[in-house]
Amino acid sequence: MSESSPQASNENPEQKIKPKSKLRWLRWFMWFNVIIGFIFLPIAAVVFYAITIYPTLPDPAELKEVSYQVPLKIVTEDDKLISEIGIKKRIPLDYHQIPERMTQAIISSEDENFFEHGGVDYKGLARAVFELVTTGQKQSGGSTITMQVARNFYLSKEKTYLRKLNEIILSYKIENELSKQEILALYLNKIFLGHRSYGVAAAALTYYGIPLSELSLDEYAMIAGLPKAPSAYNPITNPSRAKLRRNYVLRRMHDLNFITQEEMLATQAVEVHAKRNSTVIDIRANYVAEMARAFALKEFGEDALQNGLTIVTTINSQFQAQANKAVRQGLQDYERRHGYRGPIKTLDESALEETETVLKTLKEISNFGGLMVGVVTGFEQKNTHVLLETGENTIIDFKTMAWAAPYKNVNRVGKKPSKPQQVLSIGDVIYLQSLNNQWQLAQNPKIESALISINANDGAIHALVGGFDYFRSKFNRVTQSKRQVGSNIKPFLYSAALDSGMTAATTINDAPVVFHDRNLEDMWRPENYSGRFYGPTRLRMALAFSRNLVSIRLLRQVGIANFANYLNRFGFPAEEIDQHRNLSLALGSVEFTPLQLVTAYAAFANTGYKVDPYLIKEVRDFNGDIIYQATPKTACQKNQCIEGDERNAPRIIDPLNAYITTSILQDVIRIGSGKKAKQLNRLDIAGKTGTTNDQKDAWFSGYNPNIVTTVWAGFDQPSTLGRNEVGGRAALPIWMSYMKEALKNEPNEAIKFPEGLVNIQIDPETGDAVPPETEGAVFEVFREAYAPEVPSISQKQIEQITDELFE
């Protein structure tokens, strides 16, 4: 014992306390990490977020002025929809415009506590986390409607903690800045709901074809089920899953006391009936729509297609509908005159037993211009049974098919059929046209046509058809197709003659002639269309009957250079005229577009003013404010214009010239090459036919004092339309069909006789003035300055006196 004591007393005291010191240091280090990890780091993270990230978050106040990607809307002057152009279909609504049932359905399926929480529903988040932990799958979303608004408007869809944090912070900011109603409206206008539809209003039209306010309960619930997964729960592509989702929404609506149990059960029993509906177009005018789209892009840039602009055109919906009908029927009439080219294809008779397969085949065939595709399934006496691509069966009466002699060429057809079997066979796939409330055999025409109609006094375009069907050919023949105008040029030549001092009674010899012109062939022997010659002819009769030889001689008297300059007044391009500075100019060898022609003819209609055609009346922004307004120059009528006003259209010919030219063009319809138009029984119409060599182009341009219309018909690759297919046959009927509708509300009154003109009796053979009441005399209108003196005694009376003296 005694030996151990000294050893114990020699131990180092520091060695005894060292383990305790290490333990204290370890405890201190642990507490330091706890303090850093749970206090200082979060504070630092918050400070870092507040300094670097929070300031970059968007200001939710901007949502009050949010602009949606809304399609460009194109309408007629009477507010009929022509087209909607844009990637996203959207119809934004204010909160008060959204039906309560829609908001109830959305809240029930997406955020039941929406009106209670402050932007984040922590109970919902906790529930979503618990379901994820316990099941391994995401059962319900933790995002509120406000959080979805934050994500949809400002954030990406990447799944990161930072994005979720930003989403939560933004949600609080949004709730602080906007009312619940404003937030809900933003959500319901923004969400993607499948098939290019954004927002509930667009979805209503896409899936049900009716406005949102007209949906039924099951339809509201169906749309409310889409935000979760627009593809998976789509009622068109996946109706069974869509029904399950819809019924879940209805069950939630019942749980939240929005609907009764009876309503829930009855609505859950409703079958899925959604189908894809395209935008309801009121009037077909695709060439117009493309012109309006090009205007929007030029004036407002690429954003024009998504900023919700509305382009109001000058198109009259009734006029446009009739123009479509007139052009399509005119081309079908041409086809009927030239025989049947045969079926599209012929199916084997045995294949007709598989109806679904046959219908699929029919639907794969392109059809244009309102035509229907069908297949011949049998015959009964003189009736032909046809299955249409719609699945309906119809009968073609042979009386409507009697035209269908076999096509040989543009000038010849085969034997006229006496029974339908001589035209068709079972299995023939054919085109049909609805005419007089029955389906009739038709063809996809090879010929094309264009129609342009404008207001004579300011140039507003009433109707425009650029071809048989825009989707067959997007080439706009009104604005893009330059064709030889033929005799449509002659009124301008005769107007130039009047301007130079000639009168409608001036006579020029209609006789054979051979011209040597270095700009043409070595020798040119022009002829009248009839091949006949009529001797001395008054200008009135020469224009009324479109006499070529008189026109050529008249051009020589007027002068080619003078006439070229005169044409420039009417807006015809000088560069085109300069290519045809020869005598063929009198016969319309020059090439113009229908738009250029109708513009020039307007000067005759409006008493002598140059107006510029325009299509866009105004453009409205998304809020309905006008951001573009057309300011057309207008022809002065009835002394209503203020002298010096920049809105006045420039005068290019005097009113007396315009009246006399118009009176001659009225004779074109009364007795001349356009006399078919007499059927319209109008006192106020005038016009001119036009036909080029070998009948490659057919024209008719005509007007009354307010409406001017030009029609062209021909093949895109110029070739003969066939014998007798002149302007009065191929183009005039289209013009008549259209103008009958266009003039329906126009007063049928004779054109007012202006001051400065006089009516004088003349000898119809010589054009010389004769005494009043001379037998066989006719009245002619003259400008007072160029009026001939009226003799007190006629030449015939002089001859009688002379004969008596010699006797």
Image (cartoon, rainbow, N blue to C red):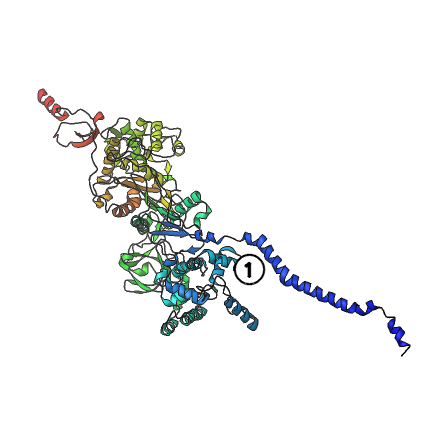
* Nearest the eye: 486 or 36: 36
Q: Position of residue 750 (x, y in %)?
A: 20, 39
Residue 76 shows in this picture: yes
* Nearest the eye: 708 or 110: 110
Q: Is residue 32 left or right of residue 15?
A: left
Residue 807 shows in this picture: no
Q: Position of residue 470 (x, y in %)?
A: 39, 50
Q: Residue furthest bottom?
A: 1
Q: Residue furthest right?
A: 3
Q: Tell me if residue 339 comes above or below residue 270 in the rendering.
A: above
Q: Position of residue 238 (x, y in %)?
A: 45, 67
Q: Quadrant of residue 107?
A: bottom left
Q: How many marks?
A: 1
Q: Quadrant of residue 495?
A: top left
Q: Quadrant of residue 619?
A: top left
Q: Tell me if residue 718 comes above or below residue 30 in the rendering.
A: above
- Where the N terminus falls, by quadrant? bottom right
- Where the C terminus falls, by quadrant? top left
Crowding at label 1, few (<14), some or many (≥20) Cα neighbours within 10 Å? few
The local secondary structure at tag 1 comes to helix
Q: Is residue 251 left or right of residue 675?
A: right
Q: Is residue 182 left or right of residue 135?
A: left
Q: Tell me if residue 400 comes above or below residue 686 in the rendering.
A: below
Q: Residue at x 52, y 60 (%)?
A: 168
Q: Which residue is mark 1?
A: 165
Q: Residue furthest top?
A: 805
Q: Position of residue 432 (x, y in %)?
A: 33, 57
Q: Tell me if residue 362 comes above or below residue 640 in the rendering.
A: below
* Nearest the eye: 730 or 492: 492
- Residue type indicated by callout 1: Leu
